[in-house]
Image: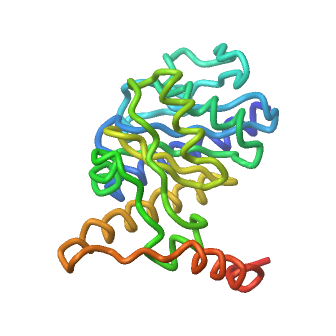
Amino acid sequence: MIKETEAIGEAMLCYGKKLIAHGLVSGSGGNISHRLDNPNKMLITPSGMAYDKLQREDLVVMDIQTGEIESGHRKPSIERGLHRAIYQARQDVQAVVHTHSKHATAVAATRKNIPAMLDNMVAYFGGSVHTAPHAPIGSLSLADNAVKALAHRPVALLANHGAVAVGKDLAQAFLMAELLEECAQIYLLSFLAGGPISLTDAEVEEEIKWLQGKYGQP
C-alpha cells in the first residue's frame, strides 16, 4: 500500500507540473486524483497549493465512499466531492484531471455543449462534449451535475468553471484533457469561418461502428 501510494504520488506530481507546462491550469488551479489498489480509496492533490511546489507528503488519501481523510496532513482539494462522485459512478475510471484550460473554459462560460464536429471527437469522446449546469465550486450539486454530463464519456465541461477528464490512468486522463482543449479551440476558431457544421447522429453512429477494432492497439 505504501509503495503503491508513493508511485502514484510521484506520477501525480509529474502530471501536476505538466498541467502548468501545457497551459491547462495556472498556479494552483484545477486538481488531480487517482484511485488506489483499494478501489474505495483515492489519492488527491491538496487545496490551494501550486503544482510546482508540491511534495509527495502534500497529497491526501481519502475514502471515496465516506469522504474521510485516511492519511495526509493537508486539506484536500475543494473539489474532492467531484472526484469522489466520479469514482462512485464510474468503476472504469482510475484517474481524474480537473482543468481550467482557456478554450475549454471559454466554451464552458457559454453554458453550451461542443457539438460532434470533428472525427477526432467521435474517435476519442464518442461524439459531442456536454456542459454540466452551473453550481458553486466544491458543491455536491457541481459533483452531481458533472457525473451526469460525463455519463459514459471521458470528458465534460463545467459551466462557468472549467473542464474534467477521466481515464484508466493519469496518462489517459491527461491526454483527454489536452484533446478537449484542442477541440474547444478549434470549435471557437471555426466561427471565424462561418461556424462549425456538426456531424449528424447517423454519421456519428456509423463512424463509431467503423472505428471499432480499427483504431489504436488491442
Image vertical order of residue 103 relative to residue 160, above or below: below
**Residue visible at 80% across and 38% down?**
37
Q: x%, y% of residue 13?
A: 51, 43
**Relative horizontal placement of residue 214, taking residue 172 as reference (left or right):** right
207 or 86: nearer the eye?
207
**Residue visible at 63% across and 31% down?**
85
**Residue visible at 66% across and 81% down?**
206
Q: x%, y% of residue 103?
A: 29, 57
66 or 194: nearer the eye?
194
Q: Quadrant of the N terminus?
A: top right
Snapshot colouring: rainbow
Q: x%, y% of residue 131?
A: 44, 47
**Residue visible at 52% across and 45% down?**
97
182 or 190: nearer the eye?
190
Q: Quadrant of the C terminus?
A: bottom right
In the picture as drawn, the residue positioned furthest to the left comes out as 192
- Please tell me in which quadrant of the rendered image residue 70 appears: top right
Image vertical order of residue 84 relative to residue 210, above or below: above
Circle count = 0
Image vertical order of residue 101 relative to residue 124, above or below: above
**Relative horizontal placement of residue 34, taking residue 128 as reference (left or right):** right
- Please tell me in which quadrant of the rendered image residue 60 appears: top right
